[in-house]
Amino acid sequence: MTEENFFERVYTIARQIPYGKVTSYGAIAKALGAARSARMVGWAMNACHNMDDIPAHRVVNQKGLLTGKHHFDGTNLMQQLLENEGIKVVNNQIIDLEKHFWKPEVEL
């Protein structure tokens, strides 16, 4: 599979993350049958910052940290987008991650 195909598969899943929910790079990788490819999912999310139809702000690391926040314009844009969806963030980490976590391997 080419990198381009992998990225497109990541974007297909990311577009389905529901409003008010988040998922992780690893959860997307697992749903794609590539459980060891969380870093590659991160690269895909980094490459989509100009694609308005992909809710990249809803993808965080496995502990709920906003590790991709530096790819968003503005200092706290990722946090603001999540908070606008009712997700509380303190010190760049999602509070109540289990409550907001969406598991693509189960939901899709």
Image (cartoon, rainbow, N blue to C red):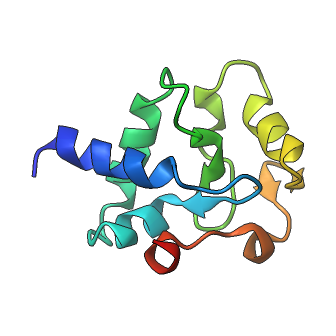
In front here: 13 or 71? 13
Residue 81 locus on image (x, y percent): 78, 37
> Residue at 45% across / 34% down in the picture?
46
> Residue at 65% across / 42% down in the picture?
57
- Count the marks: how many? 0
Q: Which image quarter holds the C terminus? A: bottom left
In front here: 59 or 90? 59
Q: Quadrant of residue 47?
A: top left
Query: Does 50 sit above or below residue 107?
Result: above
Query: Does 8 sit above or below residue 16?
Result: above
Residue 79 locus on image (x, y percent): 80, 40
> Residue at 51% across / 26% down in the picture?
49
Q: Is residue 67 left or right of residue 39?
A: right
Residue 61 locus on image (x, y percent): 58, 59
Q: Is residue 44 left or right of residue 15?
A: left
Q: Quadrant of residue 5?
A: top left
> Residue at 39% across / 49% down in the picture?
12
Residue 22 locus on image (x, y percent): 66, 59
In front here: 85 or 97? 85
Q: Is residue 48 left or right of residue 57?
A: left
Q: Quadrant of residue 56?
A: top right
